[in-house]
Each structure stands twice: as C-alpha cells, then as structure tokens.
Amino acid sequence: MSRAKLEKLGLTLPLLPTSTVGSFPKPDYLLQARARFARKEITQKELEALERKATEFWVQQQEEIGLDVLVDGEQYRGDMVAYFADIMPGFRMGGLVRSYGNRYYHKPIIAGEIRWPGPMTVKWWKFAQGLTSKPIKGMLTGPYTIMDWSFNDYYPDRKSACLALAGAIRKEVETLVEAGAKVIQIDEPALSVRPEELPFAIEAMQMVTDGVPAYFITHICYGAFEFIYPRMLRFPVHNFDLEMSNSGLDLIGLFKKHPFNKDLSFGVLDVHSHKIESPMLVKERIAKALQVIPKEALWVDPDCGLKTRTVEEAQGKLRSMMAAVKEIRQALDKAPKRKQRRIEVGSVVKKRRKKIRKHKYKKMRRRMRHKKK
Amino acid sequence: MELVLANHSSYPRVGASREQQRLRRAYAQRERGEISADDFNRVQDSVVAEVIEEQARAGCELLTDGQIRWVDSISHLAGRLNQVEINGLLRYFDTNFYFRQPVIKGRVAGNGPLVAEEFRYARAVSPRPIKPVLTGPYTLAVSSIRETSLYRDLPALVLDLSEVLAQEVRALAGAGAEVIQIEEPAILKHPKDLRLLHKALKPLSQAKGSSQLALYTYFADATPLYESLQELPVDILGLDFTYAPRLPETIARLGSRKTLGLGLIDGRNTRMEAAPQVFPILERILPRLSGGIAYLNPSCGLEYLPRDKAVAKLRLMKELRDTFLQRGKR
C-alpha cells in the first residue's frame, strides 16, 4: 500500500484513483500533419504547434471527464520504443519487420554506446503540467522493453544492453523529478516474455528508481503473467498497471493463490474493442478487483493506451469508467467498514453469495453423510 | 561430414525498396477490394519466386518458399481446417510478433490441401530443393482456444491434428519433398508433454514415405530435453543454439543418432556471427554426429529480421561454412 508514499509527496488522491495508460488517439489534423511532415511539406515547428494543440485538447478532456492523475497523451510520439530510439545516441533505425498481418515497423538497432541525450520527455511534461492543477504522470518506456524490442549489434548480451539503457532512463527520471513530476510511469510490456531474464529486468528497474522521490508505476500488458507471478512483485515500483479486461480478468485467479501486495492499476476497458463498456460492466470488473485488492491500493484505468481507438470511442470509454468509479466511491463511503468489500455491484456479489450458499449446502451434506456412517 | 546450408522456414516478405514492398501494397489493395484474388495471387507468386532466388544467390542449398503466403504460422494452417474459427491476436512466444488465435468449435478435419500446392509452385520456380514447413500438431493445439467439450483434454486435439497433418505430409511426400519440416517450438515450454508429442508424430512418420521428416524446435533451450528428443520418430532434429549455452557440450558428450539442423546463426538479431563463435562449436560437435550429413541453418525463421539483414545472414552462413571446410582440408 503506497498511500503514505503519495501523501509524503503531497498527493492526496480519492479512493480508486483514476488514470489512463498514456497514449490517446491523434486527431485527424495531427495525423495529416505527421504525414505531411514525413513528406517534408511542413516544418518541425509547424508540426509541434499542432502537437501542442492536441495535447491541450486531451488535458482538457481528461479534466472534464474527471480523471485524477492525467497524462500528456503522447501526441508527439509514434511508437513507444522508436520515440526514444530516435533520440538516444547509440541507436540507428533498422529495416522493416512485420508485427502481424500486414503491419510492419522499423525495428531500432543498438549500434553503439547508449547515452542519455538530455531531457527527452520533460519539455512535454512541463507543457502538459502547465495546463492543469492535477498531477501529470511522467511517461517513459522501460529499459527491458526498449532492449527487447530492438536489435543489439553492440553490447555483448541482452543484460548489458538493458543495464546501459537503465542508466539513460535513470537520468530522464531524475530530470522529470527535478522538474516537479511526482508520479512516473515506466512501461515494461515485454517483461513477461522471458521469465529467466526477470532478475536482470528487476536489477535494471532498481537502477532507474532507487532512491528517487517519486511514486512509480509500471505498465505491463498482453503477457504470460503466469510464468512470472508472484516473482514479478519484486519489481521495484509502487504500482503495477495491468491489462485485465482483454484477458477475461484471468489474473484475479493468480492473485487469489498468491496475494498481490502492491498498488494495482486495474485495466477495466478493453482498448482493442470499438464497443464502449457500460458503467455496469465496469462496476462489475471493479467489484471483482475489490475481492482481491484492498480498496486503498486499487487504481482504475484502461487496459492499455487508447491510441488505437477513435477520439469519440476514447472519450466514451473513459466517461463510462468514471461514472462507474463515482458510484463505487459513493457506495464505499456509505458502507460500514466491515461490509465495504461486499459492495453490492450488479451481479457479482449475487453470484458470490450463490457460490457461498452452494458451498455451505455441500458442507452440510458432507456432515450429514458423515453422521449416517 | 557434409554441411548443407539450409534456410529455416520464414523469410522477410518486404524489403527497403518500393519494388520489395509490392506485397504489402497488394495486401492493402486486396483488403480494400481494389484488386482481384487472382491479381493478389500473382503478386504473391512473384514474391515467392523472388525470395527463392535470393536464398539461392546467397548460397543456400535447401530453400523454403519463405512462408510468404502465411498470415502467421498458426492461423495459416488452422484456419483451413473444418470447425476452426480464427480469433484475436496473441504474442508468438517471446517475440514482438502476433498471431491470430484459432478457436476450435468441433472435431477438426482437413478441408483440402494445406501447403502442398504452395510447395508445388515453389518447387517449380526453384533452382534448388525446397523444404516445405508445417507447424506441428502440438504447437497448433496449445496455441488454440478449445471451445468444444470434445477436446476438454489437450491430447485429443493434438492427436486429431496429427491425423490431419499426416495427410498433408503424405501429399508433400507425393509431390516430391525430400525433407519435410515439422515445427514444434511449444514443446520446449511444456516438456511434460513429450510422450504426447511422440505419439502425435507417429502418424506423420508413417506418412512420410521416402521423405526425411525433420522436427525443429526453437525459442527456448532444448538441452534438458536433448536425450528425449533423440527418441522421437523423426529423421532430423533442428535445434536453436541461441538460447542454449550448454547444448554444444551436451551434443559433444552424447553424440546424435539423428541428423542435426544446427541453428547457430541467430535469426532474431542483426549482429553478424564471427568465426570464433561458430567454429569451436562445429569442431566439438561434428565429429560426434552420425550419418555423414548435418544442416547449418538459422536458429529460427528469418522473418524477424529486416530483409537486408536476412540475406546477409544467409551469405554469412555460406562464408562461415566454406571457410570452416577449407580450414579442415588444410
């Protein structure tokens, strides 16, 4: 539980703090501008003006919707690894590699010593924070994921490349904190791909976060968590932001076997579906989370970045999420303490009660059989 | 010892030039309904011919069609079977590549040829032998969602898929394939199912006729399973050395009764291997192999690399092999 950590940083957040994973869809005018910039038809300055306009739009949207911890929306980024690889010395852009179907991306190559080039995200963090009094998260990609999603021509092995990246990301973290960031999210979606490498992924994150006065979140998605849980709890962050809804909330079963002992940002919106979840569905998902996570440790957000949705879909999904959270907060406020974990939300509690009745009935039958013997 | 240069399986379907990106454009045009199925197939045919020629020019001696027509290694086969629907995306092992996951709705059955026609075309345009590749029954089964009570247990699905694939092996053997490659990367993640794999490979082995049946594993360390893999009913074992630092030592100690496919060239990274990395391994293990032949190949399909790097790896493989053999003669 890291409420104390947050308060020490001067952040008082409501129960079930709401946030998003980082990216928002780019408005059409920005998509067109990026294409024109690629064709050298507009200047960097002209593109940046539109990126600022889109950032302002998304900060305003998040405030209107009522989210608690905001993001800059990554309107100036393309791919989460390529953005950093483009800026950091040591990388060069590789050729096209297929990711699925007919989708390809330029996979970066680590071709020399990786160095921190100076602030990579701080300017945008400051710009976004200047637009709101709510906290804006610093948003970075973690060293393990940048390493795993790049080719390595330079370092002798994956661990050395990962640790070199950790040194560079650490400097970015320090600069974000100097600028005033109190919540920093470091995304590690690749974390679960090679369970045997978890120890050095942890070592790298330790290098990034150790002794830094900030609340750290890491986002992981679409992975085989069953191979790294509960070992992944050793990852030195305060909050794990996990994709839950796309995988049918499978992880809850794992958390029942081995308690989750950190704060959890629980993904309640499937970002690969056009369908806008109803507040009732979101409430059911949150109620399931509350079965395994104490309410003080639970955050609520989408499964992943919303950049693949339309602007309207992203807005609709977040409004639905916020409506659900508000209702649950009210229920939690009203409920007496001992009953708070049994908040009446849709069918979830009913199903649970039915299960308990069934269990009690079976127990009674067993006792009766025993007596007969 | 003869050291034959073989491609593994997939090959990058697009490259840096506009011409090398014609399949990507055709795919998008086909999706938008701007070109006919025949037009699209003609583009696929031309890219298959192009990558075959590229492999041959790089010095490869046993080629593949690059799996140019495959959406991915799971749904390309599973999607052609009865009672199978194709679902959302899932990460393919530890790669950053995603496959479409099959959903098994009822008893699986063949619905015509899977890759035999593709093999015939590739063979017709190739100057050298072509090795057809099939994803194995175990990997197909564990990559699928089982929605029918018929397959509540995994073995039932694995064995039914095995029967379907055996028909394909028969068709490929009949079409003249000298080596037929079965890919089973998933078994390394589930070693407890090795006996099931043994059972599932039997029908394939019985259907192979005079062809050689190769079992290729990758994306994990095969060392702990090495002795058990030797017992499987296949002629060739393909091994990924990039995950397995102790594998050379194990082979040197135990030898091999089967022909080996030596995956010493990293198909996942752009760094070019140097002789001091590769030669000591060849020196240790080649004397321990029986049969007088081994294959030198990439550790996995080359589609994880950009096109220019994939062809550079094949050229490097030839250079290393030739230098190694020359050195032996001196």
Image (tube, helix red, strand yellow):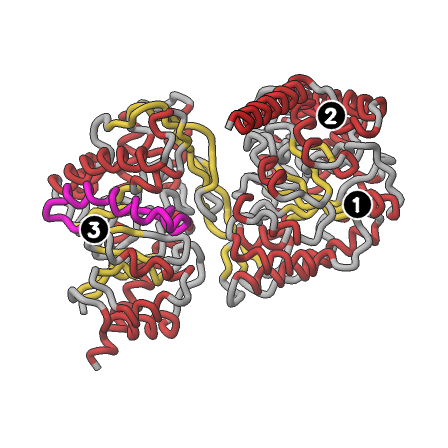
Q: Which amino acid is tagged 2?
A: Arg
Between disc 3 and disc 2, the foreground one is 2
Secondary structure found at label 1: loop
B82 to the left or right of B32:
left
Q: Is B201 colored magenta in this rendering?
A: yes
Secondary structure found at label 3: loop
The quadrant of the image that shows the N terminus of chain B is bottom left
Residue count near mark 3 (Cα–Cα under 10 Å), binned few <14, some 14–19, many ≥20: many
Residue count near mark 2 (Cα–Cα under 10 Å), binned few <14, some 14–19, many ≥20: some
Residue count near mark 1 (Cα–Cα under 10 Å), binned few <14, some 14–19, many ≥20: some
Q: Which mark is residue A2?
A: 1
Q: Looking at the image, is mark 1 or mark 2 earlier in the sequence?
A: 1
Q: Is residue B291 above or below residue A305?
A: below
For the stretch drawn in magenta, the main secondary structure is helix
Disc 3 marks which residue?
A: B233
Q: Is residue A273 visible?
A: no
Secondary structure found at label 2: helix
Question: Looking at the image, which residue is at 42% across and 47% down?
Answer: B16
